């Protein structure tokens, strides 16, 4: 952590999503706070009635160096926490009791089991055990920069995410995917890749500042982690601390092909198809391609399951931007 400790323990800011896991987030927050205080740590609840207020309180606490670590729990809270701590010396703790918990999964952290998650965090806090990992900085015209811990989705996966946000029952991602595939039409894209190390077999052309691709596709995803959507292995070889993005491009044009790819994504086998490419680069700019009257409007991009806004945007891997509390062993 940042080396500043309150007498007898660390100063920990806690943020809980009360709706996570059908109320499990609230119960986990109470249990977490009680255990941390019993360990002698100073705990302040930074949660607020709205996500905007919560984000502001978390960011203010980090900027004032009022906390040694920010602890988040519940689906979507990792994204909120990243906005506050990315690029700072403040560590991020994760109690993964939401419905997805993809970022915790890629770090090998316990998920779903509240006592196990809390004990893992307590062990990491006591040992000051921090793992530095990459994050994605998302920038674009007329918007403030955003941080993404897991993946930036800008195609079918973004459209599925937007539809799934309106659902609340188990299996919502799968049901949303089936609905989107039923009306799918490939979108036109223009990509620019910077710091390219692997073209993934996708035909590229040189551009002024890197490499470019123009065409229609079902999916364009820039990932820091190997999974999204509660276990969808979108880029199964992604490494969270290699300083690079795994950029998936699927120039799939038909609904039948999109329907064949989706089930394979649960195991990551889709990347072996000839119509799916995974490139590796330091950054990628994703923009709308040439206007196509037959194509549907491009979906808004999403990051960590949260709406980022319309294209264009640039996603850049920032090495070591996040310091995550991860216990070496319990």
Image: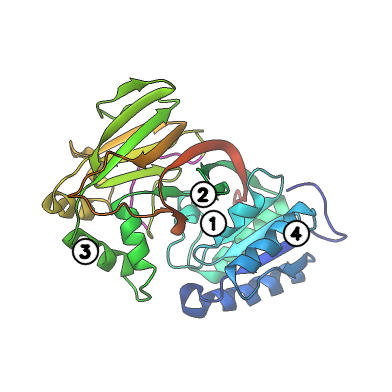
Which corner quadrant of the image does residue 292 belong to?
A: top left
Q: Give the range drawn in magenta.
A: 231-240
| Disc assigned to residue 296 | none
Gap in angstroms between the C-alphas marked 1 and 2: 6 Å
Label 4 with label 1: CB-CB less than 8 Å:
no
* Residue on which the image places disc 4: 61
Residue 120 position, x and y percent, is: 60, 59
Question: Is 295 left or right of 243, judged from the image as shown?
Answer: left
Name the N-terminal-most of marks 4 and 1: 4
Name the N-terminal-most of marks 2 and 4: 4
Number of other residues with Cα within 10 Å of mark 4, as a class: few under 14, some 14 to 19, many 20 or more: many
Name the N-terminal-most of marks 3 and 1: 1
Q: Is residue 194 above or below residue 318?
A: above
Gap in angstroms between the C-alphas marked 3 and 1: 26 Å
* Residue on which the image places disc 1: 79
Q: Is the magenta stretch mostly helix, strand or loop?
A: loop
């Amino acid at each position: 952590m940042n080396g500043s400790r309150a007498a007898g323990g660390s100063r920990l800011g806690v943020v809980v999503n009360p709706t996570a896991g059908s109320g499990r987030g609230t119960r986990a927050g109470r249990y977490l706070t009680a255990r941390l205080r019993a360990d002698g740590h100073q705990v302040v609840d930074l949660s607020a009635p709205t996500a905007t207020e919560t984000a502001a309180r978390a960011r203010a606490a980090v900027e004032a160096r009022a906390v040694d670590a920010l602890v988040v729990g519940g689906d979507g809270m990792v994204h909120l926490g990243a906005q506050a701590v990315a690029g700072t010396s403040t560590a991020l703790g994760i109690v993964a009791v939401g419905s997805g918990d993809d970022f915790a999964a890629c770090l090998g952290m316990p998920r779903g089991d509240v006592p196990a998650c809390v004990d893992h965090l307590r062990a990491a806090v006591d040992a000051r055990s921090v793992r530095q990992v990459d994050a994605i900085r998302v920038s674009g015209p007329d918007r403030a920069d955003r941080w993404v811990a897991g993946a930036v989705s800008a195609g079918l996966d973004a459209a599925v995410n937007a539809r799934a946000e309106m659902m609340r029952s188990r299996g919502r991602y799968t049901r949303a995917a089936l609905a989107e595939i039923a009306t799918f039409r490939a979108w036109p894209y223009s990509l620019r890749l910077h710091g390219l190390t692997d073209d993934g077999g996708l035909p590229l052309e040189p551009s002024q500042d890197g490499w470019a691709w123009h065409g229609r596709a079902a999916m364009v995803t820039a990932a820091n982690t190997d999974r999204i959507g509660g276990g969808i292995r979108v880029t199964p070889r992604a490494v969270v601390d290699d300083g690079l993005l795994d950029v998936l491009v699927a120039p799939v044009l038909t609904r039948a092909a999109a329907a064949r790819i989706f089930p394979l994504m649960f195991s990551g086998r889709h990347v072996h198809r000839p119509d799916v490419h995974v490139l590796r680069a330091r950054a990628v700019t994703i923009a709308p391609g040439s206007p196509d009257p037959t194509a549907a409007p491009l979906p808004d991009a999403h990051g960590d399951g949260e709406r980022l806004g319309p294209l264009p945007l640039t996603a850049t891997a920032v090495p070591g931007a996040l310091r995550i509390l991860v216990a070496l062993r319990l």
